[in-house]
Image (spheres, rainbow, N blue to C red):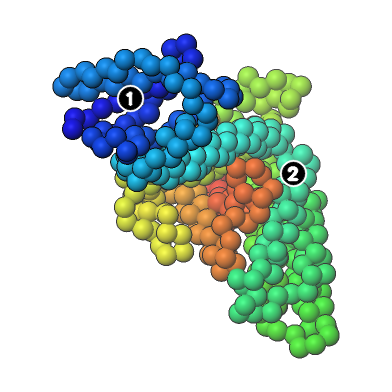
């Protein structure tokens, strides 16, 4: 028999499709269908059946038949095995695809939200840091001390994490807190005294004594991780204070300084330390940005196993961006005057930033965490943002102090 589609006319021409796939010649067999749902609850219904096929139309003369809902239920349930399997499989496939699509949309929405947070907080941090660098003095030092304190807290929490404590005994918690406070005071002491070698040595001696006199069995791992924390989180950042506030010779050739408002310090405000700090900070930001973009675009060769996402291609692009930024800013700020010195300064900033980044990545990898913390939304912890600056300050200060003994050349 030819394939038919059928409709049930209920009351006044309200048609409900029955989706009949085959029509049997046996009068005793019920019509196959998929669904039948009455629109109104009436005990008796007036039914008209109309059949039409692809080749010829077979019409049944409308006949008034009074049936109850049992007949409708019987027709709806007749031959369930004849339901179109392809439609059922399609519905199952749709049911399997919908959760996946929903998950993909949620993931995309989460990434967009993280990107917005990253941009907003990144701009906020950049403006705040730029203002602190321009202000210098106690403003810059106190801001640096606050960052050092938070970074030290994150470092000692990483040392106490399961990934690192599995192979060592971490220092006691009270020692970690005392060391965080000591690290925070180091930049302030640097600004006040100019040199904190004696202070750092004395602090290290006191901390080492406390570890050796503790109850139980002192471990060398406790001593080494604590001493490295004092050096990494406290001593190295102090070179930024030496660079920004210690090199107070005026950068006489800087054009911006000539037009700087007198109320904000005038031309004397633009010192070699300020100019060198601005160039160094800008070069580090350029190195990180260009390395990220270059790695995303053409990165294929892994740089090191410490951080698998970093590539040689990204590092080369980052180096180029860092050196270019250093050269451009040296022309704008008229320091250093020599092109070779500007290129060398860019190289030094780049290698310092990469070394600091990889050092922090190694600590996080041993700790078994992705971020050092969650202080900054979209960025992670404070160490995740300042890792490139930790070693660079010492290198930049040494470059200006030793390799450029005459300011402005």
Any part of residue 180 in sight: yes
Residue depicted at 61% across the width and 36% down the height: 117
Residue wearing tag 2: 143
Q: CA distance from mark 2 to mark 1?
A: 80 Å
Asked whether the viewer can see residue 235, the reply is no
> Among all residues in the image, which is located at the extreme left?
55
**SS under mark 2:** helix
| Horizontal relation, residue 214 to residue 11: left or right | right
Q: Is residue 226 above or below residue 126?
A: below
Element type where label 1 sits in the image = strand
Q: Determine the residue located farthest toward the top in the rendered image.
A: 12
Give the residue pinned by disc 1. 6
Tell me residue 21's x, y (percent).
28, 34
Whether residues under marks 2 and 1 lie with C-beta atoms below 8 angstroms apart, the answer is no
Label 2 neighbourhood size at 10 Å, few (<14), some (14-19), many (20+)?
A: some
**Left or right, 172 with reference to 228:** right
Q: Residue 315: x and y, percent?
A: 39, 50
Pair 2/1: label in front: 1
> Is 263 placed above or below 202 here?
above
Residue drawn at 16 percent across, 22 percent down: 55
Q: Locate the N terminus and report the quarter of the image it occupies.
A: top left
- Point 42% across, 65% down: residue: 305
**Which label is found at residue 211?**
none
Q: Give x and y (percent) for residue 402.
A: 55, 54
- Residue 355: x percent and y percent? 50, 58
120 and 393: which is toward the camera: 120
> On screen, 164 above or below 276?
below
């Amino acid at each position: 028999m030819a394939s038919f589609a059928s409709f049930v006319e209920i009351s006044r021409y309200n048609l409900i499709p029955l989706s009949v796939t085959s029509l049997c010649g046996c009068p005793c067999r019920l019509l196959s269908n998929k669904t039948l749902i009455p629109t109104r609850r009436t005990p008796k219904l007036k039914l008209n059946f109309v059949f039409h096929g692809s080749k010829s139309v077979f019409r049944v003369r409308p006949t008034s038949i009074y049936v109850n809902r049992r007949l409708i239920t019987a027709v709806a349930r007749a031959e369930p095995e004849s339901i179109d399997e392809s439609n059922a499989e399609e519905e199952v496939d749709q049911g399997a695809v919908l959760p996946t699509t929903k998950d993909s949309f949620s993931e995309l929405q989460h990434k967009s939200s993280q990107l917005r947070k990253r941009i907003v907080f990144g701009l906020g941090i950049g403006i705040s840091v730029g203002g602190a660098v321009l202000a210098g003095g106690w403003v810059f030092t106190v801001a640096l001390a606050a960052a050092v304190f938070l970074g030290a807290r994150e470092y000692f929490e990483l040392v106490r994490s399961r990934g690192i404590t599995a192979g060592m005994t971490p220092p006691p918690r009270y020692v970690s807190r005392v060391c965080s406070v000591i690290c925070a005071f180091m930049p302030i002491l640097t600004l006040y005294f100019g040199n904190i070698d004696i202070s750092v040595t004395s602090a290290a001696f006191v901390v080492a004594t406390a570890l050796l006199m503790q109850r139980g069995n002192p471990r060398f791992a406790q001593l080494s991780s604590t001493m490295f924390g004092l050096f990494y989180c406290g001593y190295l950042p102090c070179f930024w204070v030496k660079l920004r506030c210690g090199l107070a010779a005026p950068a006489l050739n800087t054009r911006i300084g000539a037009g700087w408002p007198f109320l904000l310090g005038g031309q004397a405000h633009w010192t070699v330390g300020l100019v060198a700090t601005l160039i160094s900070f800008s070069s580090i930001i350029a190195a990180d940005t260009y390395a990220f973009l270059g790695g995303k675009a053409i990165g294929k060769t892994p740089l090191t196993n410490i951080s698998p996402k970093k590539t040689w291609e990204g590092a080369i692009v980052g180096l180029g961006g860092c050196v270019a930024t250093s050269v451009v800013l040296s022309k704008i700020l008229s320091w250093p005057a020599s092109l070779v010195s500007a290129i060398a300064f860019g190289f030094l900033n780049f290698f310092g930033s990469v070394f600091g980044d990889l050092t922090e990545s190694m600590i996080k990898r041993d700790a078994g965490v992705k971020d050092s913390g969650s202080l900054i939304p979209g960025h992670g912890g404070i160490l995740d943002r300042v890792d490139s600056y930790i070693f660079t300050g010492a290198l930049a200060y040494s470059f200006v102090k030793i390799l450029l003994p005459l300011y402005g050349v």
